[in-house]
Image: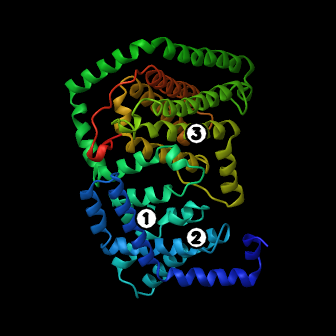
Amino acid sequence: MLRPLRLLWPPALIGALRTAFRQARDGRRLANDWARGAVERLVEEGSLDPEEGEKALRSLEAPETLAVLGHLGAHIAISVPLRFPFGSVARFGWVVFFRLRSEARALIRREPDEQLRGARKIHTLTVAVGSALPGLGTFAYLVAEPLRKNRPLLAVLLDEALRRLPFGLYRGQHLAVLTCWLACSGPGVGSRMVQSRWHYLRPHHLVAWVRDAIESLRPHWKLVGGILAVNAVGLIIAGTAFIVTDNRAATFGEFGPMQTLKAAQLLLAGVAGYYIYTRFWRLPQAGQRVDAPGSFFWIISGMGLVWLGIDDYFGLHERGGDVLENGLGVTVPLLNNPDDVIVLGYGIIGLTVGFIFFGELLRSRATFPLLATGIGLLVVSLAVDFFAPEGSPSGGLEDPTNIIGAGFVLSAYLVKLREVWSELPAAPESTAVGGLPSEP
């Protein structure tokens, strides 16, 4: 009988659980050995600078890091004998148990506040949800704050986890470039990146940057103008039909022509993001270029846009909102609908990805203003949807800003695709320590 079927028999399941939790007691040593081995291997391969490797090894001795590694090792130990769905349930239960135990001890004044704050940093909702994922849930504690802020060590452990992806995705998708950039960037890269770009806000730099952006857009004005013209004509026709028939559903409603246009633009932008990524990696010595890590922005955001297009067309977040409101009785203060929380979650994810790859966005003078304009219009549309009273005149801004915003986003991705597609093979740009890119 196959092993998964044997696990369905209660004695086998109980035995597997006993083995898992017995091994979990030694989780700290297991995770520490695993992390040290990962650091030493990357240094030996030349993917990680020896100095950064030393820092990562020293950080393993920090109390908060040791605490997280103990729970990470427990998850690894649990995942060895238990497969989905039992491993997911056990890992999720592990996170919830330790969080509730810390909260209970704090209530009866048996645990110092400092220990409670540490537990809240480690056993978070994100870790709990991530631990339930098949396979990758084993490494959910990588997103706990003590490891998340230790960028070199996080990158090393993330690299080790990604090597376990099936179908050769680690090598086929060049993930080593991304994780090694994270490791070589070191802690504080976000603040340093903002400081290095701060001078762009000075008036003379800002004016010069805008002029360069306009000049860079000049070869693409027909493409951008054509996309925006299609959106404008569609809005004029739909608006006229709405005025004549007084039937919004026929033009702007679910599965209507304007919703189809908006979803199609998001889907096309997502597909363009995929081709930007694949085309970049066909260039000679692409892995040695300074902008190699930034290429991941386009495929990551592209997948997000494809999902948004599907979600928007079929109203998936609205159905999720119905479940929250009608099934669970959830109401959200200040917002019109509970599904707005899901949309806000999408926005937070998008802003996080944009911040991580901010250098890549600024690198393309033609793409950045288009993308910034598109996102700005989408934000206006969301603000109207969230806060405008039903039937108010300001509610009429929602659909035009939404559709034109999607048009600007599509324009940005197609312009970037044209730039990458027309790029001639060239010598690699400057590289960082160990031949790895220093900034996306």
- The span from disc 1 to disc 3 (Cα, nearest Å) is 39 Å
The answer to whether residue 68 shows anywhere in this view is no
Q: Residues within 10 Å of mark 2 (few under 14, many from 20)?
A: many
Which element type, helix, strand or loop, lies under badge 3? loop
Q: Residue at x 39, y 58 (%)?
A: 156
Asked whether disc 1 touches disc 3, contact meaning CB atoms under 8 Å apart, the reply is: no
- For badge 2, the amino acid type reads Phe
Q: Residues within 10 Å of mark 1 (few under 14, many from 20)?
A: many
Q: Residue at x 43, y 72 (%)?
A: 31
On the image, numbered disc 1 is attached to which residue?
Answer: 144
- For badge 3, the amino acid type reads Pro
Res. 92 mark:
2
- For badge 1, the amino acid type reads Ala
Q: Tell me if residue 337 comes above or below residue 121 in the rendering.
A: above
- The span from disc 2 to disc 1 (Cα, nearest Å) is 14 Å
Residue 317: where, in percent of width, then height? 64, 46
Q: Is residue 103 left or right of residue 321?
A: left
On the image, numbered disc 3 is attached to which residue?
Answer: 389
Q: Residue at x 50, y 75 (%)?
A: 74
Q: Which residue is at the front of the view, 352 or 337? A: 352
Location of residue 154 by image quarter: bottom left
Asked whether disc 2 touches disc 1, contact meaning CB atoms under 8 Å apart, the reply is: no
Q: Which residue is at the front of the view, 103 or 390? A: 103
Which element type, helix, strand or loop, lies under badge 2? helix
Location of residue 343 by image quarter: top right
Q: Give the mark nearest the N terminus, 1 or 3.
A: 1
